[in-house]
Image (cartoon, rainbow, N blue to C red):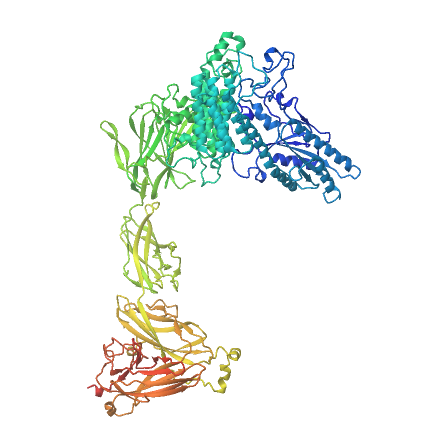
Amino acid sequence: MEAYPDEYVDHNLPLIVLSGLEHVPGEEPSVSNRQLLEHHGPKISSELPLVQGERAQQLLGEFFAADGSQTPWNNKPNRIKGGLLGFKFRAVGREFSLPRRKAEPPTPVSPSLAPSGTSSPGAPPSWVLHSPISPLSPGSPVFPDGVTTPLWIAKHQHYIPSILISFFNFTSDPSRNSLHDNQLKSEINAIKATLQMSDYKTRHVVILLSDKTILEPPDIEDRLSNIRRATGLDPKTSMFFLPPDCSRVEVAAFVTSILTTLQPICVEYYRDLTKHTRRKKNRGHIPPPTAPPTRGTSQTLGAQGWGVRYEFKLGVFAEFRQEMDAAGRHYTFAFDALLGQDGIFETTPIWSPRWDETRLLADAIALRIIRCLLWNGLTTQAVQSWTNYRDRMRELVDRRGKGSSNYGWEAWETRWAKIMAELVHRADLPIFGITKSVDVESAIYAPPEKAIPVGERLPPWQLLHHPGYWSKLAAVHAKTRRSLAEEIPEDDRTPPGRSPASAVASRHGTYDTYLCPEPHVEMPLPDHEGFDHSAEIVDLMNESVAEFHARGQHRAVEKLNLELGKDLVKQKKYSEAFTILKPVWEGTKWREEKWPYLLFEIARNLYECARELPDVPTLVATQWELLSSTLRKDPTLPYDLMKCAASISPSEDSEPKPQVQLKEGAVTSFLSTSFIFAELEGHVGEPLPAQLVLTSNAQVGSSPVTLSKLKVQLDGSLRVIELEHKADEGSTTSKGKVTIIPVAVRESHDTSSPRSSYSGETELTISAGETKVFSFSLIFRESGPVNVINSTITIETEQFEVQYTGSSVVDPTLIWYPWFVEGSKGPRSKRLRAGEELLLNVLPKPPKMEIHLPNYRDQYYTDETITLQIELSNQEEDATSAVLSARFKGRSRTVPQISWGPPATSEAPPQLPTLSSPVEVEAEASPIRQPTHPVGTIPAGNSQTTSLSFTAPWDSSDHVLEIKVLYHTLSDPETPISKTLITDVVFIAPFEVNYSFLPRFHPEPWPSYFSPENVDVLDSAEAEANSSPLTPKGIVQRWHLGARIESFADESLVLLSAGIEVQGVVGGVFCDIAKSEDIDAKGDGKEIEILPRTPLNRAFVLETRKGSLDDRRAAHLDLTLRLEWGRKDGITLPSSDDGAQEVSDGRIRTALSIPRLTLPQPEPRVLLSSSPFPPSNPSSSSSTTTTIPSTHLTYTIENPTLHFLTFELSMEISETFAFSGPKFKTVNVLPVSRRGVRFVVTPLGLAGGRRGDGGVAGEGEGGGGKDGKDGVAAEGQGGGEMGILLKPVLRVVDRYFGKELRVLAAGEGVGMEKGGGVSVWVPVPSGREE
């Protein structure tokens, strides 16, 4: 926007003049003819000195901090401090001149200038005076038919303030207070009088800077009141007082409060000017000029022009008020009046200076319309307005002007695009903010505003793009401008002083020079100064590149840099072009994205720069890329890589031979390599055929290249394959054909690396379109995958050395690879299957060692110590030296540890380590590797056996055992061979145990509640202090724990012993194991054989006692069932004659956790026990077998509480038995005591069953008999005594609580029924079975 006057393009802000502070230069307007505004106008001055000091400087700085000249042109709030509108400030010192209100009468008076209203020749003329810059004043630059001038905007923006602020010192000196106050009154009244005489409505504001606070001298308030009354200043809006010693924050707040107060005054000032302008517009006639123009040759401004002038003024005043909506409407009205059918352009001749002035005004109005639209966020409408004005102006210029096919129009297009870029930049729209976050992308264009109908399809060029887009558009027009300027004939480029007048007049009618130089300056002759097109293009391109780069549009940045570089090369500015093109060429993605045209352009121009500078590395690199046939061919280039730098002589400072490093992806190569094997798999020690293919895709007609070295780097046991050039005079190359060359390669070993290398020599000269296939065989010494890391092509000349590093793997998308073979008509290719991601898999040498496990079982048991025999059978043709290793793999938390048997070469077996428990590892942990076990030498055809041992884990799990033998033959110790045996090892739990837990009657008497020796026990507080925890004094209780053991094994097992252990107690209880038998009664102390799926019962008696009688807590028992067992064929008795440590004897010890047993809280309960009636007497005669069978039932009521309880008992009558005892009875039970009630029960029918038969024996928990175990029925064992199952029902009800107690089985021959109740087994003597 620098081509336009600042007054036309700057945003208008309310003007405030600061008088009395230091003068700030540089604030004066830059328009011409400003003497029309400055001379002979009212002058405001003061004799009082300037206000100086630190406080004055702070005030000046704070006022200028609120200046809105450089703020963004948008409607975002809080753009200025305090959320104020922007202001324009001028610091003028003590003197300031206002413009004249009316122009001076024209002098000297001539008859042609005499006003038409003069009454007589002798009378003084009666002039109608107007503004000095009005089209009606003869001295105005727009007289008589001009519309407006920038001076009018400068008048209101720089000379006529809305507010004049005067700063005065306010001192407190009792001897001079009166004089000082009078001076202030005089100066203020003089300034107000001058403003009143000027006929301007500028508001006067006074700020007094005191040297004391208002509280210190008592007369300050009176003095201030006196000044206000004498000057007529409004104390709220026209007079302000600043005390001394104010901090910077207080000064800033003071300035903000003043501006907040003055802001509505400023707005009202410009609203009054708007009203005045609207009244002048609506008066309906054109005022007469001060003096008529030259009669017969000129006309005054018409009504259409005055309408444009007034609408423009209204728009400017609305912009002063920051009402951009109203300003945009007025500008639009003025714009339509300019370009309408009857507009100013239609009545102004092209040769008139008014034509260019009107174009200047039209550009300013269009610019302001776009600014108003951007201010209000109407981005799409702003672009449409910009495009509409461009199209209308092109149509106007083509129709009435000098056309749009000249450099003048392209200069205007360039300027118009630059204006849009600057407007978008100054608008600082949030949509175009640069984001530094990686996750958020910066917007490149603004979406349509809400005013656009939804669904309306808009072309992309009607959307507002960021400033870089418009700078790029300006650069395009600048290039077109330069092209058109270059077409100017030489005669028109001659300076006017050397050209005839007719030629100069012809130029004026041919070339459009609106805001652009004449033809002789636009494109000067050689050795003449003129316009620098290249500098303008470079500046525009750099601005565009900066914007595109800031928004991450890297492709656009590369394209712009390419265009800029091409332009600089065209101007032969090679150094600048090289600086721009080199980074683009190195980092472009055009190679990856297959853009050969763009790649050729940048490589070709960079090659030109490198040749002219010169730069040998870049020259070689670009020549390498230009040789590729994927880029188009340039007939002017010499495609000869070997001699591309021959014309460049090395300087004394440079290296004798530059090193050029090229990589795949960073440059497009004309040479490519591929390396493949004949097979996807091979074995160690076998020759494997391979081919290294070198292909040239150089431009047709290019010179051959000779490689110095061709190297392929591999991973695996082979390190590198290197071919060196060896000239072969007898060999000739055939262009465009395939040549297969056998190469003799040599294996070598480097001491610094264990991997081997191969090298060879051959002819490495290749022409364009030729393919050379180097064939050889390789031998690998180690197994494993083999892939190509890279390949390196080295070319060395006298001027340079270049190395190109690339991949040697063919296209991975191919499903087959070419393998070249000799055919009858020359070399041909056949298809080989491609590997997925592997070039070659080198397999180990096939093993001939067999691994057997003679004593392997399909199933093992937990906690078992297992020894596996491993037999190695050597089927090799030579003796071997072997080493064994084994490991377990699985997802279980427990992984067994492995220990090895004695080595084969040892005379005595080593001591086996003690395996106490498996090793705990995490579920996803890697397998535990055990140390290797040397086997020793195994002769050919022989076998050798060793063993490994491990302890099975405690839980059921599946594992995989991997046994690996690593060996080598004695004849080839450098080739390791391995054989692996993988087998599943399943560990299962051999037993499943079900448990029953029932109470039993304990014969021991309870402690008496009334006994003196238990008084201290009943006192809980004293008991805790005196009783010893080792001497429990609570009630002893007996419990029955039944274990039903069932084997899940597929074979018979031997149970040697079974017992329980107390692991822990909770609740202050003491537990003793009163009875625990290890073998069955019928086992006679020997081991018991357990058949698969056959249950075996075990019973245990526990006695528990609380520490004191007042302990009412529930208790818990944690017990463990320990079983000692073994396989039927694996039990051996340990023997040790010398007392040494015993080896495993086949005994397996398993610990099974019993679910936690809960002892209920001490509450009343009823226990039922039975005994024979009459009691059996061993000395009785055999006649007792004929006695009627009866049973003695004892119901024991226990009261462990500290309350006296009364129970009501009732025995129900049954048809199956008769009983002797109370049918109804009331029993009183003292605290901490028990009582028994006895009944004799006799069966009424003798039909019974044999104990253990189905349907006869009791089905409850612990239904029992005399089988040697308390309450455990020997079901399924067969046999057993005859008896009858009775179900007596005794109801025991607590009289007080009304709660019925459940009867619990608590003795031999008593069991619990599943549906509730108890059952009693009454044995029948053998003599009464019938």
Q: Is residue 342 left or right of residue 761?
A: right
Q: Answer above or below: position of 631 versus 946.
A: above
Does the image show residue 486? yes
Q: Of 958 and 1198, which appears nearest the observer?
A: 1198
Q: Answer above or below: position of 167 versus 706.
A: below
Quadrant of the rendered image containing residue 740: top left
Give the number of callouts: 0
Residue 730: image x %, image y %? 31, 23
Does the image show residue 578? no
Residue 375: image x %, image y %? 50, 34
- Residue lying farthest to the front in this orientation: 119
Q: Of 387 and 1141, which appears nearest the observer?
A: 387
Q: Answer above or below: position of 475 versus 958.
A: above
Quadrant of the rendered image containing residue 253: top right
- Residue lying farthest to the left in this orientation: 1330
Residue plotted at (47% across, 40% down)? 437
Q: Of 1178 and 211, which appears nearest the observer?
A: 211
Residue 506: image x %, image y %? 48, 10
Residue 865: image x %, image y %? 34, 64
